Image: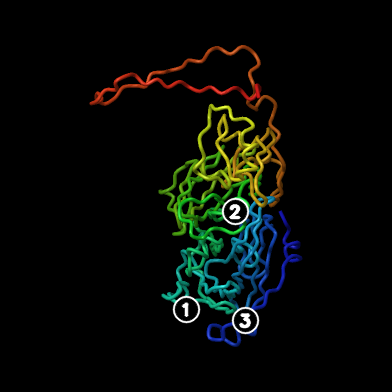
Amino acid sequence: MTSRRELFKLAGIAGGAVAASAVSRVAMAALPEAVSQASADTMAPLVPGTGRPYNPVVTLNGWTLPWRMNAGVKEFHLVAEPVVREMAPGFKAHLWGYNGQSPGPTIEVVEGDRVRIFVTNRLPEHTSMHWHGQRLPNGMDGVTGLTQPGIAPGKTFVYEFVARRPGTFMYHPHADEMTQMAMGMMGFWVTHPKARNPLIGEVQRDFCFLMSSFDIEPGAATPRTAEMTDFNLWAWNSRVFPGIDSLNVRLNDKVRIRIGNLTMTNHPIHLHGHEFLVTGTDGGPTPRSARWYEVTADVAVGQMRQIEFLADEEGDWAFHCHKSHHTMNAMGHGLPNMIGVDHSGISRKIHPLIPDYMVMGERGMGDMAEMEMPIPDNTVPMMGGDGPFGSVEMGGMFSVVKVRRDQRPGDYKNPGWYRHPAGTVAHEVTGPVAEPPRSGDAGGSAMPRMNKASAPTEVKARKPSSHSEH
């Protein structure tokens, strides 16, 4: 994690043309500097130095946008621009975002704050800014053509409203959404309560991230913006595993995770080792009567979900989308299934002739993480982070919640791999193993088949050789 001091060493001042028709001369003369960030590290929380106090959030592989106070108004400056985002080590993408990154920086305010956000457009086309989930004047809602003209390239518009209710929100364009959202234009917004709220509990760790999807072909760097269904990269804050930071917490911390979905499908988000409550949505905190413990919460398109749990089990706990294809990288969906077929050596011979040749491994997709198959430059492997016991056969929307008793309060550094107490790790049985019971009975049916098959169908199980025999 990068410190706030290091962030400002990296920060730059971005000027820009200002639309006189959209911004007053007084505001134009006092435009706040536009801080930029290029690092993909998770930045330390930005503790408020001005304005009302609050407990800040930590943006996974992201940062919080600094502000200035101007006559009691909290002022921010966002710059919409092309960016280069490292989605995982060895893989960078040409995206669009804000202030040097996709997604843009998190905006944090307090309930009742009057906020003024300057938005400068450095894209090749017009844009706008929609404040998803906010109660505000209609003319500040940011829908191009309906509530405002588009922000032309090189121009700056200003939005001003009061943050009327606490909760978890986001921002994104409502202009050429097919292109701009597919290119990564989005950001998180958190409005903290101004006083103790009976529905909003205190937590020691407060994380947030946005889910996005991209179609970037192996070897390419720019998303295909016309894609609607067959995305091959599923990301948290425009990062894919193993490029997603772990969420590092102290044993018995109360942890809140805020999640937003700007993909084109739903995501059942699953946490290992703990139960959690859904304590809030983009509609606000959920009533206590509507909360129940679960380990998987579905986040639909355009929704925000806020989950909370007590981190009372030490270890390295998987945290991921439970749709299997969403925990893989850069994969096509038309792969032949070669399970049970010995095709060792064939891939290496064919690949020089057909670079995109790929089939499912003889023993399943896990083979792909072990085969060291050649991949094009600037391409992340389909799966396979390096864990303490070997390959972690995951990609995409996957990370780890690391719970440690010796993690200091407010310390978000990665503590390394968990040291399991003796006798608490599953291990190989070395002695004789009794033959397990098996069943070949297919069960009954509701009624007899009308046209019976002329001859019984015989299908035999394929049992490929073991790893040790290769």
Label 3 Cα neighbours within 10 Å, binned few <14 / some 14-19 / many ≥20:
few
Label 1 Cα neighbours within 10 Å, binned few <14 / some 14-19 / many ≥20:
some
Looking at the image, residue 377 sits to the left or right of residue 117; the answer is right
Q: In 3D space, how far apart are the residues under numbered discs 1 and 2 (Cα atoms)? A: 36 Å
Label 2 Cα neighbours within 10 Å, binned few <14 / some 14-19 / many ≥20:
many
Q: Along the line of sight, which residue is nearer the eye, 391 or 215?
A: 215
Q: Along the line of sight, which residue is nearer the eye, 167 or 140?
A: 140
Residue 31 versus residue 232 in the image, above or below: below
Q: Are marks 1 and 2 in contact (CB under 8 Å)?
A: no
Which amino acid, mark 1? Pro
**Rendering coords of residue 426 (x, y %):** 63, 26
Residue 462 versus residue 318 in the image, above or below: above
Q: Which residue is mark 3?
A: 17
Residue at x-position 54% and y-position 55%: 214
Q: Which residue is mark 1?
A: 149
Q: Earlier in the sequence, mark 1 or mark 3?
A: 3
In the structure shown, which secondary structural element does the residue marked by tag 3 occupy?
loop
Please tell me whether mark 1 or mark 2 is closer to you in this view: 1
